[in-house]
Amino acid sequence: MAKRSLTLMAVHAHPDDEATSTGGVLARYAAEGVTTVLVTCTDGRCGDGPGGVKPGDPGHDPAAVVAMRQAELEVSAARLKVTHLETLGYADSGMMGWSTNDQPGSFWTTPVEQAADRLAELIRRYRPDVVVTYDENGFYGHPDHIQAHRITMAAVAQTDIPAKVYWTTVPRTAFEEFGRVMKELGVEWDEPDESSDMPELGLPDDEITTWVDTRAHGAQKFEALAAHASQTENIFFLQLGQERFTELMGVETFVRVRDTTDAPVPEDDLFAGLR
């Protein structure tokens, strides 16, 4: 009987999220023979439309945006050599405070148990050894990212299948470099100060458990992000060019929140203790 390959499942909120924080690990582990499963929870309808038309502006057609972003997602997944792409198809909720948060069918209004049941079904089907998603704040407070976190953790608890679970993060020392690069690009970059209501982003370096070098797959990650051409105004990292993008985004970092392997940390492999 053939031995089952290791499996990685990444659970993301929108089309394009897969490339930013996990494009490197998806490409790297696929190249190593790992089965990769990408789950995208929403349809991205609150993204920019053709010609850069913004949500709520005249001419913004959510149905057209959904079709466009689905096609882009499929190209991105192909460039990352994703084995299985699964879409839950919930309506994009938009940024926190938008009226779209509370529209019927939005991901934000979907009961956690209901969406978790659907994700649990996928976990039972693919039996991932490792699951990756966001932290409890969705990294930066986006409602769909928060909801993706909630349903993932509920589905993991329901199935008890993954050996390891990780949340994406960024080392706080990296934000200084990000800020410098953003200013070079002419992008306004205001880090939250102590008086800000916004939670501090990322983690201190010593709280990050897992540092995965994905620079060998920097071209794939860049190309996957570039596949989301309709959103390029918001994907400012593309302005760096492939070489500098890889330098800045070539190590993906995570905090391990579930582990049955007793692999020591810090680690440089999501599958440490499993192979």
Image (cartoon, rainbow, N blue to C red):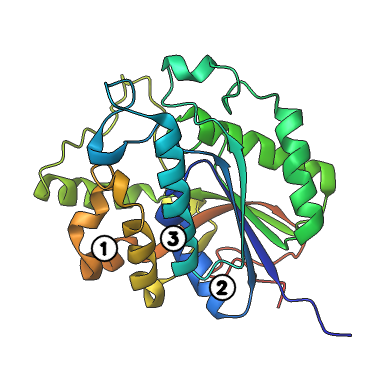
Residue 103, position as x, y percentages in the image: 54, 16
**According to the image, label 3 marks what residue?**
76
- Give me the disc on residue 245: 1
Q: Nearer the viewer, mark 1 or mark 3?
A: 3
55 lies left or right of 161:
left
Q: How many marks?
A: 3
Residue 142, position as x, y percentages in the image: 46, 30
**According to the image, label 2 marks what residue?**
29
* Label 3 crowd (10 A; few <14 / some 14-19 / many >=20): many
Q: In terms of depth relative to the viewer, which is nearer, 234 or 51? A: 51
Which kind of residue does numbered mark 1 sit on? Phe
Cβ atoms at labels 1 and 2 below 8 Å apart:
no
* Label 1 crowd (10 A; few <14 / some 14-19 / many >=20): some
Q: Residue at x 67, y 42 (%)?
A: 152
Above or below: residue 144 compared with residue 35: above
Quarter residue 37 falls in:
bottom right
Q: In terms of depth relative to the viewer, which is nearer, 100 or 160? A: 100
Between discs 1 and 2, the one toward the N terminus: 2
Q: In terms of depth relative to the viewer, which is nearer, 68 or 22? A: 68
Q: Residue at x 60, y 66 (%)?
A: 270
Between discs 1 and 3, the one toward the N terminus: 3
Of helix, strand and loop, which one carries label 1? helix
